[in-house]
Image: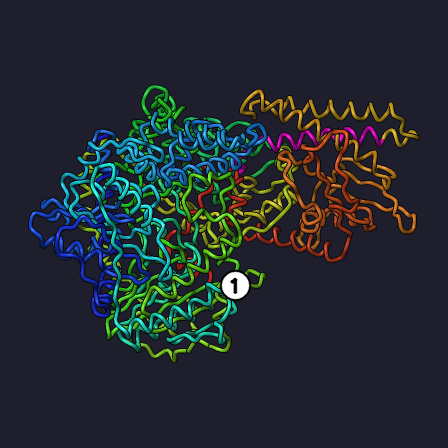
Amino acid sequence: MARQLRSLRHVVLLRQAWASSAHTRRLFSSAFSFNASNSEVSSLSAHPSVEHQSLVTSIPNVEALQRVRWILQQPQRRVLLLTGSSSSESPVRSAMERDAPAFELERRGHGIFGVREFCQLLLRESGRESRVFGHAQLSALLLHSDLELPGVNRLAATSTLQRRKGVQDLLQLFRLLEREGVTPKQYAAAADKAGEQVPQELAETYRNYRELLLQHNVTSWDGLVLDVLALCGVQKGDTTMQDSFSQAVLKEYTDVVVDDVQRLTPAMATLVGHLCGQPSVQSSASFSRVLVDGNECPQTQILEQQLKNTAVDAGRERGVTRISLKIGDELGDKRAKMQAFAKQVLTQSPGESGAVPSPIPFKCWRFNTSETEERRVGAFLAQKLQREGATQATVVCPLYADARRIALAFQKQGLPVRINGDQFAAATNSTGVPIHLFDEPGVNAVYSLLCALCFPSDSRHLYNVLRSEYFAFPAELLSWLMEKEHRSHVDLFPVLEAFVDSRGQSLWTSLNQREGEEQEIPHLASSQLESGLEIAESFVAIIKRLRSECHQVPAAEIVQSFLEESGQLETLLSPSSPEQERKALVLADFLRELETAQKVVGSDQVTFVAPYLQQLRETNLTSSASWETTLEVTNTNSTAKDSSIRVLPLTARALESIVTDGEKDCSYVLVLMSMRDSKFPGRMKRLTLPLPYELLTEPYPVQTRAEHLAQCEQLAYEALTLGDYSEVVLSFAELAALSSSKGEILSRIFQPIWHEGDRPAVNNGNSTRTGSSKATSPKISPSKPSQTAVETNAASVNESSHFWLSEVVGVLRQFVNRVFLPFLHHDKGLLAPGASSRAGAVDEKATSSAGETNAEHGKPLARTEESTASSEGTCRSPAPASSLSYEPRHLSYSQISEYLRCPHRYYLSRVMKLDGDVSTAMMFGRALHEGIAAFANSLAAAQLQGEVTEELKTLAAVEAEEAFMRVWVGDGYGLFTSKEQAEFLLDRGMTALGEFIQTQYGDLTLEEIVHVEKGFSFHVPEAKMELRGVWDRIDRVSRTSDGSSSFVIKEFKSNMGGASRNMRKLADESLQLKMYMYAFHQIFGEAPHGAKLQQIGGNYNTSKTKPRRTAGDEGFVHYSEKAVQEAKDAIVEVAEGLRRGDFEPKPSFGECAFCPYAASACHFATDDASFERQTARRAARG
């Protein structure tokens, strides 16, 4: 099985390499023609020399290619070309493949490798091969191994998100150390010398990390270089060299050429310098590019120094010669002027004699919205393609997600678009949201199946499998079954079994007996009974059998058995379309990870494998098959040589491909698009752990805001000077989206070269190019590409995929024991592209209360008439949840807040009644709420009796602690990672409770506690809905100004983590406080003085005897008509949305990170991955 799996993987990698090679061929063609026609290439020595030649320049060049070609013409010479990038991305390799196939060069003894690939080959041939883990796999391995995180209180870090962040921080540091070639021994020595605890703990953790990788026979990409350095004996601080291995590596080569030295890591530069210094090397040369002429390349310096050291150790003198690059006067003058213009972004000021003008046309465009920007820039580019003949355009935008968004916007306008760089393009879908392996249609249902077998009582994963395209259980019928499951307090599977055994009668019996009243199931659900029974019978039979087998057979065989019984095996072994092929390849990636999981956990049983897969899913692993779906050319009416538009993010890696072609009959346009300040420079990302600077080489990682701004200025300068442009456009939008009210400003980086007054030209709409007419008119909204363009593109895809389909089919037929199921899991109508979540206060008490949902739902689902016709079709496809109308019996703040944050989460929890997770934080908050409620009740009773004595205060405190402990014992079981953590959090909770009690006695404005945990209910006429809720406390307080008293509503929020919170800001933005003040006015007929959001806990690092003193109005908001209106608007908005059946997700990092359904039933990432699906949905709405 493993051999068959590797064979399949080999096909995937070959296809990726083929696609990347085609891409780099186009990229290098531009660079080569530019330099060949415009520069006087420096001549290199034509005879063997022991001198190492280095070229360091700011001008893109092809000197490395010419050097290699010269060596290839010499007899008895074998060249080793090493590149700082991957060999598939190397323009030199692409150019050489045009002269001769790569296998022909290898047959003649030559080698072309990226440094990492070369290291991987060396380890394989020396019998030390390890599987290379990417960042996602390394994160899952560390999470599974429970590696102790230094510098962090593990007992307090109860959140999964906190643990993941701690692991990410560690991996950032470890990657930096590996890139520098630092061994655990060297790090430990430096930490001991510093004499600080945290560095010493980090050094110990680094040692454990490296041992963990060795234990599982895996490594990282940078770890490959570190391993080869160890074999060569070139580690920092080593005094001996292992010459035998190093000489064996280079014995087959006479010459070494190193290109893109600036992209080497310090460890790579050290290794390459060591190889260049070997006695068998007759000549060596390195080529690097810097930002500004006169700058030094740190990697070149490391390479040269190591070369000299190696030569001395080998008893051979090696010199280093710096060579120069000569260019023509005309080209040199133009470049100098463009560099002087661009230098203004580096200095952030105009030149000494005023602003330096651009030597080429430079336009600055300001737009109202990003949609307008996309449309007008697209129209401008369409004009360029139409009027000026052969045109190459590069659009540079701040982030990866922006690149994907803009590319698809241009695609809709029928423009010939390509995205350079598969790696970043594959990471996002059409809305800029990452597409991860476990969210892929061919993987998600299989993953949920394994989780459902591992966790039988978790109905969420069963729900996900049922709603997949394979089963497509009717949504309305499933909603009624989930209603029964929720009320009978059992998991979903027994309900399905009873439903099948009784032929559907169990559902009717439950409905008729509920609350003693006769109820009829809706006609639509009744009409789905026959098809639902058929699906349920098949599902129950499969799950029963797999549950009995999952403890005896390996997880891979469980998957095989499931797919064979599902009838999908033949489709997977004989894919008949690119879509089916891609699903098969994605499942192959998943099964490879499944195989790795079995090795890591030391067992092939589902019970042990599924938890590891859950960890891996949280790391956002991307499928390699998604690289093949990169948008390259979407309109084949114009070839890449004739005209095309490429879209890049403004990153150092992407800018490597910005070098332009210099043909006389071709113009080049650079568009710096969406350059608003919030995105570029935006926020900086820094390493949060202390760095061992004595072990690092300059430039150091960016750690300050000033360094981040300087880095962004360098990127902007590089983008402006790398190419030989005929025109440059700089644009931004004042509103990022129509739904956003936040104003945007131009990026501060480009302020020195910005000027006002330019307006984009408006085309008259007369277009002769197919697929471009709609793009050139700004009055026409973005539309679907022309039919001709679509048909041409489809034909191109089918033609290019034919060879690979035939190759993959042969391998898949051998993959009988390790097959995979490509059925879709998503609802086609669930997604709202790019929607952002609305902020709302977290109601811990309402979230943790399971009893509230039992009485707050009315009719589970009522399907709109327009969707009934498709419910009985022969094709099994999930009914879109967005077409389901829902009428709850009442609304509460928790419902409203949940719906506003994400309607789809509301749908899963309130409509489908999928249970969420009970977290430690929820139990912590509930225990504190019960404790303070008991304290308030006791104190209120004492106030009614007269003076509050010390004895009564003590009694109230005792009752509070008892109430706290009752909840803690009942709900805390099984939520802690260890006994130590349970004791730690218990002490923290008691501390928070005691601090709260002390602050209550110090409140001089408190006259009386009027109500504790007081429920309310009233009708909201604007929403035609009842609103229910519970006030935590209502106090009568004295006003210091006039001596009168008034009422204040208090809401308490626990703070288990102890992080600092801006309570004033939280209170001002709290919809809950506004809603509860509105409810008070309606119930009691008078307005309260205001409401207060009070924190419980968060003062854990201070002395218990000296509680922190805060301002009395912290977290307090006054009653106002504006606040009441906002509360009404929210209630109406939610009520109307539920009645419309609007349950489309609003994905965001903050919401999805803590969503209890993110790992099972909610998969928005792929629901909108198809542009055609989005276009069809918008057309249907319009």
Q: Residue 77, position in %: x, y?
A: 10, 48
Q: Which residues are magenta?
A: 912-940
The kind of secondary structure the magenta stretch mainly shows is: helix
Is residue 376 found left or right of 1045 in the rendered image?
Answer: left
Residue 523 magenta-highlighted: no
Looking at the rendered structure, the kind of residue marked 1 is: Arg
What secondary structure is marked by label 1? Answer: helix
Local packing at callout 1 (Cα closer than 10 Å; few below 14, some 14-19, many 20+) is: some
Numbered label tally: 1
Residue 530: in sight, yes or no? no
The colour mode here is rainbow
Out of 255 and 382, give the one closest to the viewer.
255
Rendering coords of residue 858 (x, y %): 60, 42
Q: Is residue 79 left or right of residue 461?
A: left
Compared with 298, 550 (above or below) is: above
Give the image quarter of residue 956.
top right
Vertical placement of residue 21 versus 222, above or below: below
* The image quarter in which residue 966 lies: top right
Residue 612: x and y in percent read 41, 29
Q: Residue at x 38, y 80 (%)?
A: 764
Q: Nearer the viewer, residue 539 or 311?
A: 311
Does residue 318 appear anywhere in the picture?
yes
Q: Give the percent coordinates (x, y) of residue 419.
A: 33, 58
Residue 969 is left or right of residue 80, and the answer is right
Q: Indicate yes or no whether the magenta region holds residue 935.
A: yes
Query: Which residue corresponds to the image point at 25% horizontal and 56% vertical from the top-left?
Result: 23
The residue that mark 1 highlights is: 748
Query: Residue at the location (87% across, 23% down)?
Result: 951
Residue at 36%, 60% in the rendered image: 294
